[in-house]
Image (spheres, helix red, strand yellow):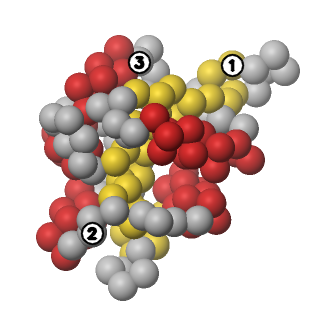
């Protein structure tokens, strides 16, 4: 977390989507949380941001369909490397296999487009609190 002038820390998020308008919308939706946001436009940039970070980010929000690697592939690679950062994976094209994949990864939540600000903020708060509730697929805990 970044250091604020009053000594408190500010959460750091990465928002990854190849659509600049979607990144701007996500940034706007996250404004009530008063977090520091790094924006990237694709999977390769996201991997670089995660690898180059002095400290792990507190949360990553990534689209699934982007220039290679996909958002889901980045989540899998991050977990394989031992990164425990929670991920919100967003998609306009949900299917059962994708839902299962995101659930199996752990510490991740699939959010289907279109969604409202309250949906995003609820997902973020749930992940940051260390619990993940996904309607219809049970309750999962972020792996320690």
> What is the number of the mark on residue 38?
none
Query: Mark 3 = which residue?
Result: 53
- The residue located at (44%, 14%) in the rendering is 54
Q: State the CA–CA distance, disc 2 to disc 3.
A: 30 Å
Q: Quadrant of the N terminus?
A: top right
Task: Tell me if residue 127 comes above or below residue 53 in the rendering.
Answer: below
Q: Position of residue 114 (x, y in %)?
A: 47, 66
Q: Name the residue: 34% across, 48% down.
A: 63
User: Where is 142 relative to 66, above or below?
Assistant: below
- The residue under label 2 is 94
Query: Circle 1 is placed at which residue position?
Result: 3
Q: Can you tell which quarter of the image residue 67 is in? A: top left
- At horizontal 25% and vertical 33% (from top left) the residue drawn is 43
Q: Nearer the viewer, residue 70 or 142?
A: 70
Q: Does residue 35 lie above or below 131 as drawn?
A: above
Q: Nearer the viewer, mark 2 or mark 1?
A: 2
């Amino acid at each position: 977390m970044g250091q604020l002038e009053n000594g408190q820390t500010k959460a750091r998020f990465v928002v990854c989507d190849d659509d600049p308008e979607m990144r701007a919308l996500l940034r706007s939706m996250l404004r009530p949380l008063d977090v520091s946001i790094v924006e990237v436009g694709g999977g390769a940039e996201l991997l670089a941001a995660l690898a180059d970070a002095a400290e792990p980010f507190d949360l990553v929000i990534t689209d699934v369909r982007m220039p290679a690697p996909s958002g889901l592939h980045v989540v899998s690679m991050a977990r394989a490397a031992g990164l425990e950062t929670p991920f919100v994976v967003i998609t306009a094209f949900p299917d059962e296999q994708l839902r299962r994949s995101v659930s199996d990864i752990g510490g991740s939540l699939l959010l289907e487009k279109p969604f409202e600000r309250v949906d995003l903020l609820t997902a973020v708060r749930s992940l940051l609190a260390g619990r993940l509730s996904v309607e219809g697929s049970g309750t999962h805990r972020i792996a320690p």
